Amino acid sequence: MFALRLILKNALRHRLRTSLTILGLVIATLSFGLLQTVISAFYAGAEASSATRLVTRNAISLVFPLPLSYSPKIRGIEGVTGIAHANWFGGIYQEPKNFFPQFAISGVEYLKLYPEFVLNDKEQAAFAHDRKGCIVGRKLANQYGFKLGDVIPLKGTIFPGQWEFVVRGIYDGKQANTDTSQFFFHWDYLNETIKKTAPSRANQVGVYIVQIGNPDNAAAISRTLDEQFRNSLAETLTETEQAFQLGFISMSEAIIVAIRVVSFVVIVIIMAVMANTMAMSARERLSEYATLKALGFPPRFLVLLIFGESLLIALIGSLLGIALLFPSAAAFSAKLGTFFPVFDIAPQTLLLQLACAAVVGLVAAIVPAVRSARINIVDGLRSIG
Amino acid sequence: MEPLIEIRHLAKSYQRGAQSVPVLTDISLDIAPGDFTALMGPSGSGKSTLLNLIAGIDKPDSGSLRIAGLDITQLSETALADWRAAHIGFIFQFYNLMPVLTAFENVELPLLLTNLSRSERRERVELTLAMVNLSDRMDHKPSELSGGQQQRVAIARAIVTDPMLIVADEPTGDLDRASATEVLALLNRLNQELCKTIVMVTHDANAAQQAKSIVHLDKGELLRSGA
């Protein structure tokens, strides 16, 4: 109890120095948390993927389409319980910076494969009956103020022309990590339009979403499926939805690694700052530590004082950093819009922040604690604080 | 009467680079219980080193140093720390109080190493602060006290555990004349009324006059001792 009181009093002794160190810790913890959340956001799609969904694409590249005629053949493969298809649309809403993912999907059958997109029956029916209808995620609707019945104009890039869609439904996510920043419309509408403007590109799909009954059979079904189209004009590559998502993430691997490295560099920098603070404090108190030793206090008591103070400062800084992470992440997410469909703070991030603070507190105290514990009493009494 | 402090052929030197500088040479000295001894000598004579050895915060190179029959040169660091906590009261020139603690907390410090309960500690601290006439200053921090008051807090801290020996290193060295007189009177009272054995290092002849015996040191050697 006395040690705790002394630790607290020592920590508050140089208020400006302690405040600045805590400020540094707050900034470091906050930066670390934000950067870790950015990394988590990259992986959010992969984490939200279903083990019972496979994605089949052109084996050469995702850029190349697959014939629509593959659909019945895939459906006939043993273990396949559902199939849908989709095309990346890539349109511009008002101006290029207003990016959000747009997919032409095979209507309600696509939605059936994604039970995490929660859409009421009325809106689903309205979407099904309107060929120019579209459904948007809640996050997207909130960002641009889309309401039911609104007409959304998109300027086509991959599929040139001016397109217009009517909002027939707004879906919510079943889980917190469900992507609700997407825009879906009927593939049939896209295909019919293309038949008129670019007939050679008609009846082609970007990817097939294949639902399977048993996730354990994913590898076998993927092999069978790809085998079926071997030596065809459009060979396929089938993988689990998670592997498909991770494939996208791997394209940004260098950026993710850089963010990860920077997040830990921030921690190393604050560790050096904190170590300097603790070293200065301990050096100034050598005479007091020597006095305590002369009075009979064992060296471990001094070690306790220094580690306690270091951990206390680190804990205060990290808790403030964690508290600020929530509003900062919300502001960051709002600013980024739909760039990261899911930008949630993972519990692991909070634990990692606390763990880093503990490591900073412990490492910063090692050298001053050892030096103080070993101090010769006579030398220490001579030192000037 | 058996001496409380029995020093035989004590020697101590310090390393200055490759060179060994002798500080104390073949010191033999007895101090009786209840004595008030002043160690005097010019700077570098070894008087503070001798006091540090007697207090058990430094180790000699050779010789024996018995206090109440126990040769403290043979004790381990841990045992020596426990021994100091139980038997020695320290008074330093610059008081060496913990600046973040109040007078009460500073005096309570040595009692934290005992098995006394919180209320017993409080009782003892209040009694001791009353003895040094600082009952009304117990909630004050050292920075809120004068030099003389700080030294009286240090004296209270030195006697609160009722040690067998009080060591004082220039206790009046940082004080004005009035405060120094006050502190010396207090030490005298401790010696006369409570029969505390005190060993005090001082430069000040007036301060030394308060002691029952004076030991002179020069260049690490004992010159003479007298009453």
Image (tube, coloured by chain):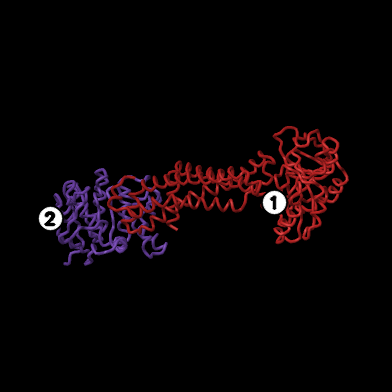
Chain colours: A red, B purple
- State how far apart marks 1 and 2 are (Cα): 87 Å
Quarter of the image with the C terminus of chain A in it: top left
In-image side of A366 versus B74 (left or right) = right
At a point 36% along the width and 48% down the height, the residue shown is A285
- In the rendering, at what x and y percent does residue B22 appear? 17, 52
Foreground of the two, B167 or B54: B54
Where, by quadrant of the figure, is residue A331 drawn? top right
Answer yes or no: is residue A186 visible. no
In-image side of A370 versus A181 (left or right) = left
- In the rendering, at what x and y percent does residue A351 appear? 57, 53
- What's the amino acid at mark 1? Ala
Is A321 above or below relative to B119?
above
* Chain identifier of the residue bearing label 2 in the image: B
Answer yes or no: is residue A163 visible. yes
**Which residue has dot 2 on it?**
B225
Where, by quadrant of the figure, is residue A130 drawn? top right
Disc assigned to residue A176? 1
